[in-house]
Amino acid sequence: REASRAQALLRSGCSFDGMLAQLGLRLQTQSLAPWSRWITPRMPSVSTKRFDTRFFVSEVPAGQLASHDNHEATDSLWLTPAEALHRYLKGQIEMAPPQIMSLSHLTHFECVADVLSAARSRPPPVIGPEPFDQDGARVICYPGDERHSVRERALPGPTRLAYRNKRFCPVDGPGALFAPRPAPAPRT
């Protein structure tokens, strides 16, 4: 019920802070940890929309139910980062490059506690993708790529995504999105 009242206030033009005040709500942010900040390229890439957005990580309380607003998000689903990437690559769900790259980064962690520890141990990287055209495709490169103006790598995983067939995919193939798995221990 509170969620539908909040949505109505926001859709009527009420600010987010104003909506919280009107409903007497306080955000429980102590479990949030900043993960990354993404700023769209100055030069339009595939989309002309510009944004400056921040990603956060948090442990979800047991029994938490996902809910979407049917406006900005139209479906809710709990998936592991690897499963979400597999579904994206199969065309079952849509994602934008910041989501793809963030999920790729998250595949490097074994559990939520490791993700939270990593997030709290460093300032969130600021990632400004830089697009260019190559071999008939739009390519977006990220910090650490030889074509990017920032030489220091911001994230593990691929440093380039190419836009082909209405999908973003690493130029080195889909496997580049997933953390390398350690080789099995030799049997003795």
Image (tube, rainbow, N blue to C red):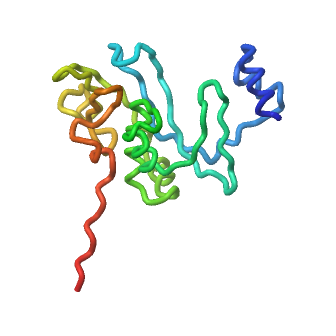
Please tell me which residue is depicted at 27% across the width and 29% down the height of the picture: 162
User: Is 78 located above or below residue 169 in the figure?
Assistant: below
Please tell me which residue is depicted at 33% across the width and 38% down the height of the picture: 154
Q: How many circles with numbers are drawn on the protein?
A: 0
**Apparent side of residue 33 relative to residue 41 in the rendered image (left or right):** right
Residue 7 image position (x, y, % from top left):
74, 25
State the image quarter where residue 104 is shown. Answer: top left
User: Is 4 located above or below residue 84 in the figure?
Assistant: above
**Apparent side of residue 119 relative to residue 2 in the rendered image (left or right):** left
Residue 121 or residue 57, whichever sits in front:
57
Residue 171 image position (x, y, % from top left):
22, 35
Residue 145 image position (x, y, % from top left):
22, 34
User: Is 165 located above or below residue 84 in the figure?
Assistant: above
Please tell me which residue is depicted at 37% across the width and 53% down the height of the picture: 108
State the image quarter where residue 13 is shown. Answer: top right
User: Is 46 located above or below residue 4 in the figure?
Assistant: above
Quarter of the rendering occupied by the C terminus: bottom left
Quarter of the rendering occupied by the N terminus: top right
Residue 183 image position (x, y, % from top left):
25, 67
